[in-house]
Amino acid sequence: MEGSVQCDANYAPLTPLSFLERAAIVYGTRTAVVIGEREYSWRETRDRCLAGASALARLGVGRRDVVAVLAANTPAMYELHFSVPMTGGVLCTLNTRHDASMVSVLLRHSEARVFLVESQFGAVARDALAMLSSAGASLPLLITIATDGDEGTDGEPEYEALLRTAPGGFEIRWPADERDPISLNYTSGTTSRPKGVIYSHRGAYLNTLATALSNEMPTMPVYLWTVPMFHCNGWCMVWATAAQGGTSVCMTGSVSPKVVFEKIVRHRVTNMGGAPTVLSMLVNAPASEQMPLPGRVLISTGGAPPPPHVLAKMDELGFNVIHGYGLTETYGPATLCVWKPEWDALPAAERARIRARQGVPHVMLDGVEIKDPVTMASVPSDGHTVGEVMLRGNTVMSGYYKDAAATAEAMRGGWLRSGDLGVRHPDGYIQLKDRSKDIIISGGENISSIEVESALFGHPAVLDAAVVARPDDHWGETPCAFVTLKDGAKATEAEIVGFCRERLPRYMAPRTVVFAELPKTSTGKTQKYLLREKARAMGSLPKQGRSKL
């Protein structure tokens, strides 16, 4: 329109770095990060981030250079989410459960210039670097994040020492274009070799605001870190806590119900997150560990549909569960089950059933549809017709690093194809049914593993469960359930099968039950591809083990 202009007065590239700048001014003396007895204010945190950026820049990190990090949820990990982008660099946080072989693959693929490693992961990192060296690949500079306060080992630079000696007066290198990359996140690898997902400053900024709104995060919240910061940048909560001037409560060691409840009470936690396995852990904890909460705690969950009975129990304990859905390719959370007041009057079981839906897109996402993947037509909103979940908007990834073909395929037709199958209910809320490769086809019937798992979780002895296809010479495939029992609980295969047959159509009930611990990713997702391999290795169910459908 005539008269409109774009200039420095009315436009600046969107970036989460602006959240830190504001937090240091508005919430300067308030606690930003706490670990054990050590606390850092927002002003201290900004100063440390600037020092980190200065140190990295002195080491040669510049625009679009990748800086890899292998660390737990620590103040250093939090700070690097700001200090690396301050240099113009790209943060690449690696899964702490990866072995040396996978770490070496990701370092080589990302072409990381610097590699910061918390000392507890030092052995894995050095083995990974040795593999790179033997392959003739260039090596990143290794920096130790010492957990015991020492100065590092073998002459390696150490994080705290670098902060102390960093030149002052560093000028933040703001993105020239808001579409510039801010981070490189590798997918969890639950189904295939991990792919590098590129996040932009713009996408991270918008998804951060959406995450804060979706999780009803108040001003100056207290956030308990049970979600790994390496996973989708902590579901963008690293930047969201800065936007709201909140306090990040870090946890050392493994997550346990006792520690979680203690941290909530001690720090008066308002918000947290966790995979459904974390929820299950909390509701199944001994009564002696389930401390009364100081107030309602909002907990966001995703990764798999939580069993309705777990959601009901979480409500009883004082947690308000917000169930969402997303992918690494959508900066983490993309949809949420927005709660409506009229649902409060429903019976507990019905409330839990509704809360288990994946819901509607958050405010920064343009759309979520359930589509026929061939015709691209949206399926009817009848709660029954299954299609593929597809998403589009400003919080969808920029693409896969060094993989134009995979990027084009993932976004074919103008939508991000999730590979997840779901339905849309008449009220517009979506609900997942399965991953496309997790659907079990038995005797020509499609069986949702999620529905079978939901029935299994209703058994009083079942702590965890996953269902995959087992080959069958007659039916093609039959459901095979892998079940973890609660401590001290007992159940037989026949009891589990009978329990499911009382609640499901006969063809959907498991024909095989294997009692075992389920393999998990670091974010709590069950690694079904490993279970599928085990089920395939078992071969076809013997004739005497079958029954009529």
Image (spheres, rainbow, N blue to C red):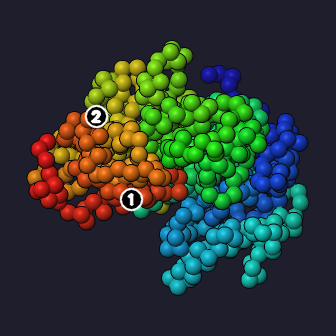
Determine which of the numbered discs, if any, sits on residue 108 in the image. none
Q: Position of residue 538 (x, y in %)?
A: 24, 63
* Number of numbered tags placed on the structure image: 2
Q: Position of residue 296 (x, y in %)?
A: 66, 30
Tag 1 residue: 516
Mark 1 / mark 2, whichever is N-terminal:
2
Q: Position of residue 483 (x, y in %)?
A: 37, 52
User: Is 428 above or below relative to 325?
Assistant: above
As helix, strand or loop, the secondary structure at mark 1 comes to loop
- Of the residues shown, which amino acid type is indicated by label 2? Arg
Tag 2 residue: 503
Task: Please report the residue visible at 39 percent of the width from the left and 32 percent of the height from the top.
Answer: 431
- Front residue of 10/404: it is 404
Asked whether residue 222 is in view, the answer is no
- Front residue of 141/541: it is 541
Asked whether residue 433 is in view, the answer is yes
